[in-house]
């Protein structure tokens, strides 16, 4: 099973490899949330800080912005049956929102987070085109059945 720690390491690897021009101006927390079949990932401002997050903020050192960004990923993606590139594609999607100034201290670049294919364009520009395409293909081919099967097995 994938863990929150895996998510964190993977996010920072993607950041380093593909978003190194995007400053990390605040603390960004990523974790698995509930099992959602429709919303695979989401980015928001963190409202309630836990002790664990207080510690993260302390370890992070002084940030330019004290607000914390929270990225959540559906808990279905803990399952290793979901390919890495699908999870990475979802994390990268949320990092594009961060780069565009949504739920981040950066300047907001667009009026709407998705209109005009801005995520796809951003992913292509950043060398994430393969991950973008492959994950879309995998989800289109498998996601429905995966969800149906996982519900049956309960
Ligand atoms: Zn989005």
Image (cartoon, rainbow, N blue to C red):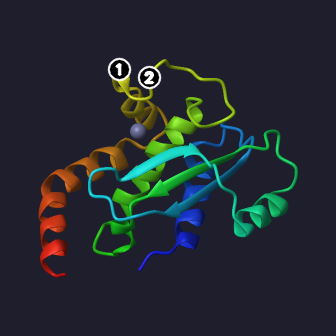
Q: How would you rate the neighbour count of disc 2 (Cα within 10 Å): few for under 14, some for 14-19, many for 20 or more?
A: few
Quadrant for ligand 1?
top left
SS label for mark 2: loop
User: Residue 144's quadrant in the figure?
Assistant: bottom left
Gap between marks 1 and 2 measured at Cα: 9 Å
Count of labels in the image: 2
Is there CB contact under 8 Å for labels 1 and 2?
yes
User: Residue 35's quadrant in the figure?
Assistant: bottom left
The C terminus lies in quadrant: bottom left
Residue located farthest toward the right when viewing the structure as drawn: 62
Q: Left or right: where does residue 108 sit relative to residue 129?
A: right
Q: Left or right: where does residue 2 sit relative to residue 28?
A: left
Residue 112 image label: 2
Above or below for 125 versus 112: below
Residue 61 image label: none
Q: Residue at x 84, y 61 (%)?
A: 58
Q: How would you rate the neighbour count of disc 1 (Cα within 10 Å): few for under 14, some for 14-19, many for 20 or more?
A: few
Q: Residue at x 82, y 63 (%)?
A: 59
Q: Nearer the viewer, residue 89 or 68?
A: 68
Q: Position of residue 136 (x, y in %)?
A: 25, 47
- Is ligand 1 closer than 8 angstroms to the Cβ of mark 2? no
Q: Left or right: where does residue 123 sit relative to residue 43?
A: left
Q: Nearer the viewer, residue 87 or 101?
A: 101
- According to the picture, the residue beneath numbered tag 1 turns out to be 116
Q: Position of residue 90 (x, y in %)?
A: 40, 51
Q: Residue at x 74, y 68 (%)?
A: 51
Residue located farthest toward the front when viewing the structure as drawn: 48
SS label for mark 1: helix
Q: Nearer the viewer, mark 1 or mark 2?
A: 2
The N terminus lies in quadrant: bottom left
Q: Position of residue 89 (x, y in %)?
A: 39, 51
């Amino acid at each position: 099973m994938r863990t929150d720690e895996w998510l964190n390491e993977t996010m920072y690897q993607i950041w380093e490899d593909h978003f190194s021009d995007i400053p990390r101006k605040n603390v960004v927390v990523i974790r698995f949330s509930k099992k959602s079949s429709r919303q695979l990932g989401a980015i928001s401002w963190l409202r309630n800080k836990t002790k664990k997050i207080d510690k993260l903020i302390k370890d992070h050192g002084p940030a330019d912005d004290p607000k914390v960004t929270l990225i959540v990923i559906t808990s279905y993606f803990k399952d290793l049956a979901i390919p890495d590139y699908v999870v990475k594609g979802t994390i990268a999607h949320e990092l594009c929102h961060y780069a565009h100034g949504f739920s981040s201290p950066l300047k907001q670049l667009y009026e709407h987070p998705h209109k005009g294919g801005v995520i796809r364009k951003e992913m292509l520009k950043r060398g994430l085109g393969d991950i973008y395409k492959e994950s879309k293909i995998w989800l289109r081919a498998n996601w429905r059945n995966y969800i149906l099967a996982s519900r049956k097995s309960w």
